[in-house]
Amino acid sequence: MRIIKAIFMKQAKDMLKNPMVLVMFIIFPAVAFFMKFFVPIPENDLFSSDMFVTMMASIFAGMGLITAASDVIAEDIERRSLRFLIIAGVKPHQYLIGTGGFFVLAGAITSVIFALIGGFSGSDFGKFMVIMVAGTTTSVILGTVIGMVSKNRQSATSLGMPVAVLVGFTPMLAGFNETVAKIAGFLYTQQINVIVNNFAEGLFKPLLVITINITVLMIVFIVAYKKKGLKG
């Protein structure tokens, strides 16, 4: 626990000094707030008053943190901080929790802001927070995997952006193509969209799919983490 706390505090301090990271937690709810209260929405069954809130929330949870998380890991690799931690005996799960913990915590706080903007309450608030935290966690782990397999920050950005766009926009395309819809069903981003756009849906299947996504990504992360240690 002491090791995880030390890594968490280090990453928190580093990220708080990085305006590019901080803006990720501000810009999405800010856009949601502006669009909800200042952009007129047609009064019909196709649009809801919270459309922009759920849209920005799903983008934030599904793809907003991927590049930020990958950049943090890639920076540790460039500075050889990761090599030092591996030599010191830091386990993969300790590094992952310590590094990604700040992102998940900040993501949960941002999710509360989204919920307040949307005026969600009761069971709707609960479902929204559960799926947002689960989605944010998956995005952070995906970002750490990308950072771990990248040689430097530039390559992490080059790989992270296309992956973020792919997982973020595939659910949007699913409504227009049956083949894409089948593929999207296996993605955590699709499950985020399912819940934030319809709170009446059950949580069991979305959380099951997200759990499978997290499990696969964690396995890849552990393998990549150990390979980095062998290379160093």
Image: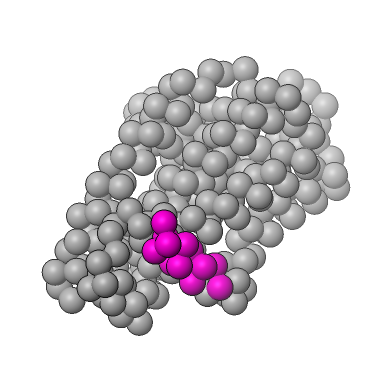
- In magenta segment, residue 106: no
What residue lies at 66% left-to-right and 37% top-to-bottom?
A: 54
Query: Looking at the image, is 69 positioned above or below residue 114?
Result: below
The front one of 132 and 9 is: 9
Query: Looking at the image, is 178 positioned above or below residue 80?
Result: above
What residue lies at 35% left-to-right and 82% top-to-bottom?
A: 79
Provide the residue span drawn in magenta.
1-13
- In magenta segment, residue 12: yes
Query: Looking at the image, is 120 positioned above or below residue 137?
Result: above
Residue 40 image offset from top left, x and y in percent: 84, 40
The front one of 6 and 56 is: 6
The front one of 51 and 221 is: 221
Residue 114 located left or right of residue 24: right
- Asked if residue 117 shows in the view, the reply is yes
Q: Quadrant of the C terminus?
A: bottom left
- Asked if residue 165 shows in the view, the reply is no
Residue 35 image offset from top left, x and y in percent: 77, 47
- Count of number-bearing discs: 0
Residue 163 located left or right of residue 195: left
| Residue sitting farthest toward the bottom | 79
